[in-house]
Amino acid sequence: MTYAEEILHLMREDEAVREVLASTGELFHGYHPQMEKVHLRNAQKLKELIEKNGFPTIALVGEEACTAALRIILHAISWPEFMRAQEEVLLELVKTNQVPKSYVAFLVDRIRFYEGRKQIYGTNADWDENGILRISDVEDEENLNTRRADIGLEPLESLVITPMDGDYHPPDPEKRHKEYIEWTHKTGWRKA
């Protein structure tokens, strides 16, 4: 199997497990242990592949496999050290267009989101205390769409994603938020 094929295989496994958990509704009630297991296993395998072959840039593995690798990194949310290490690498690679800009923005924001810091590009949303899904805190909100355009993302018309309805609305937003904060401490994203 080529480097690209190995990465694509890992991503297909992620998508298959996600699809099964979504079909039962289990995916939408916290971070499912089965999904976490796949994410961590895939991240470990990708780390080994990167150590052996170098980072899977577009030139090295093609855009599809490069994007799949970036998605695997984005999904490694229980492994902060891995995500932070890849952010350093990607911030250099994006300067020479070796990886898609938008995925680097997603990673930068995701790390900030889990650390409890303001996002730069507004790519992560969460349920607020009123049960409304909205883009979480963003730096310099006035210039957000300019920053988004610079990396190829569509402008945001509103920071509110959805009102208080829908199948996946948390029944107890306050409890869900408390569990989320506990998870960020347990995984090492935030210090106690």
Image (cartoon, grey):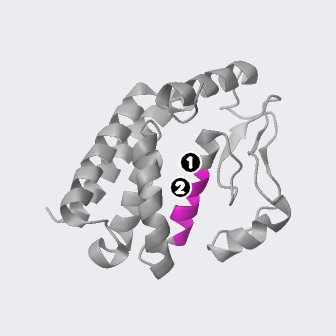
Q: Is residue 64 above or below residue 72?
A: below
How many numbered marks are there? 2
Q: Is residue 119 above or below residue 30?
A: below
The percent position of residue 165, horizontal first and vertical second, equals: 78, 34
Give amino acid for label 1: Ile
- Magenta residues, as a range? 101-110
Residue 162 visible here: yes
Residue of label 1: 111
Q: Residue 39: which quarter of the image?
A: top left
Q: Is residue 79 above or below residue 191?
A: below
SS type, badge 1:
helix
The percent position of residue 185, horizontal first and vertical second, equals: 55, 27
Q: Residue 40: which quarter of the image?
A: top left
Residue drawn at (28%, 72%), measured in percent from left and top?
Answer: 61
Residue of label 2: 107
**Magenta highlight on residue 96:** no
Q: Label 1 neighbourhood size at 10 Å, few (<14), some (14-19), many (20+)? A: many
- Quadrant of the snapshot with the N terminus: bottom left
Outermost residue toward the left?
1
Residue 76 visible here: no
Find the distance from the CA under tag 1 to the CA under tag 2: 6 Å
Give amino acid for label 2: Leu
